[in-house]
Image (spheres, coloured by chain):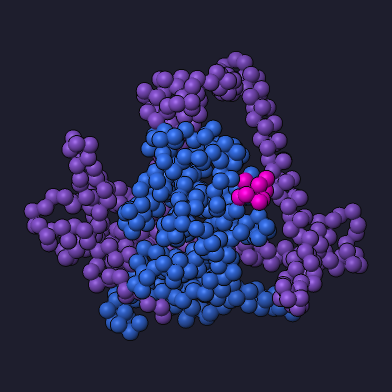
């Protein structure tokens, strides 16, 4: 057995033992999900709403024989699976391994299936079938589809035809037919985006950069802070433009402005990097919080389980 | 802190034990030589503990760091604050569980603020999983703290519509062209609060919580830019895309919450105004997550400084040769 294998085996055995002890031999345990069962639709079906361990404790204290708040096995299994996959993905930071591969494969498979389901129920059914066969869709999938919106609209046969043509590329012959709807998609998307970028970015950004370099307050007094800010904005934009202006050699005034432009760009990239780091740490924090709070029950920041961490204890350092 | 160290000694011991080989190596080889050949996995481990320990500490003690709201968070807060009870607002939740850690606290705070103000909330999503994010937030805020609000009268979930910016392009002029039912399948005309609503120009404010495409940039391009006098937009966005949205401020974007820092600042404003003397911990998620941010950022800054010192020292040595 290699050193790595010994290390992993030891860690896993120790981890499994710790989990077993915590789950079975501590007062509150860990990793359980609860639901509140309530009758719905004239008592014929039971509705299950999420509940907490705290809700369960309160219900048992009020009535030891109660069965309203109870452990949910499917949700608990889901919780343990989420914890397993979180750890499996984290394990990649050490090195590639079978657990990571499993997590990766499951993610890809589930995502593909999810997008297929979304594509059918959220795109094809309401946006196409409901327009062409409103009666059928109303009786089968969308009972709320009534009134003027439920009238048949045969114009939607055009996108149906284009969709069929797009799928033609999968056929052994006549793949060229797919080029026509593809050309339509590219044309409309380009037109839509070109207008939006010209209007929303190009023209609007020019407008946003036309700023007074000397800012006066409402009472006519000089506002140095706003003036410096505007000078910085206008100057930075001009310097960055000078850096991307290649019709002149970057010498003299143009060269100086271009060098300042590089600094402005570097500061922008630095700000972007800083924000990205903050975002990534936040994502790591939520996963670790999930492991410590929802799974291991070591902490209870939202006060869902521990009576000692009730409201009112939150104070600033 | 003393009580924490005394009671939770085991986790500190675990952290120290896991880092002991690194310390031994530094002691044996010297600081800079060991750093030159440092395996990146030690940095991962340092990052792990620098995020986990503050989470554990804050999770047990409930302590948070003080936040001073920035001008952008204040502008976002003020945009909602100026609205009157019963004003309609559109909340588009364009994100998924992958960015829930950053955007969930913002979404919670936005809904808390809107519910406390008594605004009529119209929820929608341009991302497929956005509809579930809406349900989660409604359950967390409205069902728990505002059970008196009635679905269909005070808030409605219009759900997800495919089409990205195409959806925005249509609903700015004709909402009912795309939305015939809400997420529950109820006909739009049977929902009381939809009476008289024909397009989103009638909304007093659009709030967008965005993780990327389609999101805030598309709302600016296809909703605010064509109707600058009618549609006002505030947004909460992930850290990755926040710098790309700054050029739109303030002309096209009235307020912006950038990443978890923006969420924490906005939470502070909402909790101070509407949280009461003992704010519910559910509304302090962003503030709690600033603890790990602080320690992890200190670690990263230290590593950047040390690595640069090492680089400059090496370069000087090379030049002397």
**Is residue B230 magenta-colored?**
yes
Name the residue rendered at 81%, 62% in the picture.
Answer: A238
Which of the pair B228/A309 is nearer the observer?
B228
Q: Quadrant of the N terminus of chain B?
A: bottom left
- The percent position of residue B135, horizontal first and vertical second, equals 38, 48
Q: What stretch of residues is rendered in magenta?
A: B223-231
Name the residue rendered at 50%, 20% in the picture.
Answer: A152
Furthest toward the bottom, the residue is B2
**Is residue A5 magenta-colored?**
no
Q: Chain B: what color?
A: blue
Tell me: residue B93, above or below residue B74. above
- The percent position of residue A236, horizontal first and vertical second, equals 77, 65
Tell me: residue B253, above or below residue B176. below
Which of the pair B94/B96 is nearer the observer?
B94
The chain that appears purple in the image is: A
Residue B113, image quadrant: bottom left
Residue A173, image quadrant: top right
Residue A169, visible in the rendered structure: no
Magenta stretch prevailing secondary structure: loop
């Amino acid at each position: 057995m290699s050193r790595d294998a010994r290390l992993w085996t030891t860690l896993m055995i120790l981890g499994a033992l710790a989990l077993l002890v915590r789950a079975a031999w501590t007062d509150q345990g860990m990793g359980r999900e609860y639901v509140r069962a309530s009758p719905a639709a004239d008592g014929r079906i039971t509705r299950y709403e999420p509940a907490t361990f705290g809700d369960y404790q309160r219900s048992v204290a009020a009535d030891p024989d109660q069965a309203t708040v109870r452990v949910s096995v499917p949700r608990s299994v889901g919780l343990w699976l989420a914890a397993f996959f979180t750890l499996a993905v984290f394990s990649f930071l050490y090195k590639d391994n079978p657990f990571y591969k499993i997590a990766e494969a499951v993610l890809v498979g589930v995502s593909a299936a999810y997008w297929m389901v979304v594509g059918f129920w959220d795109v094809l059914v309401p946006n196409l079938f409901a327009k062409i066969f409103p009666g059928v869709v109303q009786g089968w999938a969308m009972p709320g589809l009534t009134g003027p919106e439920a009238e048949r609209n045969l114009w939607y046969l055009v996108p149906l035809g284009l969709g069929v043509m797009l799928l033609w590329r999968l056929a052994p012959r006549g793949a060229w037919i797919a080029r026509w709807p593809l050309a339509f998609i590219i044309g409309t998307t380009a037109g839509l985006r070109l207008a939006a970028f010209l209007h929303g970015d190009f023209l609007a950004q020019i407008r946003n950069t036309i700023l007074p370099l000397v800012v006066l307050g409402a009472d006519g007094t000089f506002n140095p802070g706003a003036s410096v800010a505007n000078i910085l904005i206008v100057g930075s934009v001009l310097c960055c433009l000078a850096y991307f202006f290649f019709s002149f050699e970057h010498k003299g005034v143009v060269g100086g402005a271009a060098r300042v432009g590089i600094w402005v760009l570097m500061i922008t990239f630095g700000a972007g990097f800083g924000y990205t780091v903050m975002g990534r740490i936040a994502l790591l924090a939520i996963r670790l919080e999930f492991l410590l709070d929802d799974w291991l029950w070591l902490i209870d920041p939202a006060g869902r389980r521990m009576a000692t961490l009730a409201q009112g204890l939150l104070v600033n350092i | 802190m003393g009580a924490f160290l005394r009671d939770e000694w085991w986790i500190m011991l675990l952290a120290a034990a896991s880092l002991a080989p690194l310390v031994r190596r530094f002691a044996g080889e010297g600081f800079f030589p060991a750093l030159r050949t440092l395996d990146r996995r030690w940095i991962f481990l340092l990052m792990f503990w620098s995020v986990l320990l503050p989470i554990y500490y804050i999770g047990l003690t409930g302590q948070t760091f003080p936040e001073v709201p920035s001008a952008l968070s204040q502008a976002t807060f003020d945009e909602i604050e100026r609205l009157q009870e019963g004003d309609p607002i559109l909340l588009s939740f364009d994100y998924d569980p992958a960015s829930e850690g950053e955007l969930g606290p913002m979404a919670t705070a936005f809904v808390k603020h809107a519910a406390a103000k008594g605004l009529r909330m119209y929820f929608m999503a341009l991302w497929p999983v956005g509809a579930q994010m809406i349900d989660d937030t409604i359950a967390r805020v409205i069902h728990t703290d505002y059970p008196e609000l009635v679905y269909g009268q005070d808030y409605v979930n219009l759900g997800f519509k495919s089409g990205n910016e195409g959806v925005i392009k249509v609903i700015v002029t004709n909402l009912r062209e795309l939305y015939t039912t809400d997420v529950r399948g109820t006909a739009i005309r049977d929902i009381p609060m939809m009476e008289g609503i024909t397009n989103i120009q009638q909304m007093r404010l659009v709030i967008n919580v965005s993780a990327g495409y389609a999101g805030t940039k598309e709302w600016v391009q296809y909703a605010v830019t064509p109707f600058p006098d009618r549609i006002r937009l505030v947004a909460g966005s992930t850290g990755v895309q926040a710098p790309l949205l700054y050029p739109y401020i303030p002309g096209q974007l009235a307020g912006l919450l950038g990443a978890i820092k923006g969420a924490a600042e906005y939470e502070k404003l909402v909790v101070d105004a509407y949280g009461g003397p003992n704010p519910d911990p559910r509304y302090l998620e962003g503030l709690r997550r600033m603890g790990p941010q602080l320690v992890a950022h200190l670690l990263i800054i230290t590593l950047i400084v040390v690595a640069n010192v090492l680089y400059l020292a090496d370069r000087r040595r090379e030049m002397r040769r």
